[in-house]
Amino acid sequence: MLPERGFFVKKLAWLLVFAMLCGCAPAWAEEAAIRTEASPHAVRYSFDLPSLAFAYVTFDTKNDEGSRVLYSPNGHFEGVCDLPGTVETARLGLNVYALNGKQLLQTRLDVPADPTAGDGGIHYRFRVPGRDSVVLRCKSPQEWHRITLYAGANYLYEGDVAMPCTYADDAVTITVLTTSGNALYEGSVLMPYTPPALPDTLTGDTLRGVTMAKGVETKRMESQLVLEIGMQLRNALMAQGASVCVTRDMQDTFVGMLERSDIPNSISADFVLRLHCNSRSSNPDVQGIEVYSPLMSSYAHQVAEEAEYRRMAETMLQAMQDATGMHKGAYLLNDNYVGNNWSRMPSFLIEMGYMTNMEEDLLLSCPAYQQRLVQGMVQGVIELARMRGLID
């Protein structure tokens, strides 16, 4: 069973949600150019692809490389390539792709020299006695940088490295080498992630070995994504007057299968939303949002008849598809999930997308798309509450 974020909605208030209906059709035939402005350690760029809402940008020089997903409501995209390791004049390659990997635009340009390292978000401080210079290499799943450093007083090295393409909670491997390439040190740090502090959160036991999806392109773990999206969903529901209880608000916690139903049962929740991301290694083309609810369990029959459960699952799926524009997917009733089967209220296991599909993997880590997913789930909860007579 994949790790999840559980939500238990106790009371709901009237909410009007405007779905973001920005088109996501590919722009294979569009003629466009990348506009750039190069300066030491940074290249600003912009381009126009009117039929796209999301674009995937990659860049590289000899010492810097990175990738990120951009969102635009009107097809005009802007961004910056941070190049902390590019201290000499270098050739930059800049590429724009659709989220399925189709290349749309590319350009090559020279970046001017600056002998000092660029500023950034990873702070380092160490001493290497007797060495006037070393090489610092910082690598995450989304970017890497190779920087030659020069010692200060008493052979102290201290500064920052820009890592703007690295997602929160991802590991950054830090390697210190001699200028001839011999390793002196290797370790790792996590990019910080601090969830918003709100009441009514529950955590479970220490994280144990579990099976979870992993991003084919981002290399992120499913548990990281459901944490990010889950905290946004909690806040969105609470902002509208709902009382919300979550099963975890930290990356290093785990909640057992029976607990995932015991917790909402103990507080007499009105709904359970169980957040997951999907995986299909045998077919990377599979996409879509999927909603699962129980079918034959005795608890399920006490909650609703099969026809009503199907109608509720379809309602949640439709709300999410309308908000995201991702119209592939399905709703299913089965008895495969303990957390669903033992719930004494409507329970929905929501697979928000396939991390084994490049497009959905990239979308799931994009803040703008995460907001669409949250909008869809909030709207789904509102419509379910109306169906159940909890609100007018």
Image: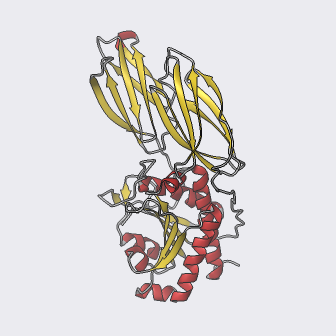
Residue 119 visible, this orientation:
no
Front residue of 135 and 157? 135
Q: Is residue 362 above or below residue 92?
A: below
Q: Quadrant of residue 279?
A: bottom left
The residue lying at 33 percent from left, 56 percent from top is: 207
Residue 266 falls left or right of residue 105: left
Residue 125, by quadrant, is top left
Q: Residue at x 41, y 52 (%)?
A: 221
Coordinates of residue 11 in the picture (x, y in percent)? 60, 72
Residue 315 in which image quadrant: bottom right
Q: Is residue 191 above or below residue 286?
A: above
**Can you say which quadrant of the picture contains the C terminus?**
bottom right
Which quarter of the image is occupied by the N terminus? bottom left
Task: Report if residue 200 is visible in the image.
Answer: yes
Left or right, 237 with reference to 224: right
Asked whether 31 or 177 is in front, the reply is 31
Q: How many labels were placed on the picture?
A: 0
Percent of width and height locating residue 223: 42, 56
- Residue 88 sits above or below residue 80 on the image: above
User: On the picture, is 99 further left or further right than 17?
Assistant: left
Which residue is located at x 36 percent, y 73 percent? 258
Residue 91, image x, y percentages: 52, 24
- Relative to 334, does residue 102 appear above or below in the rendering? above
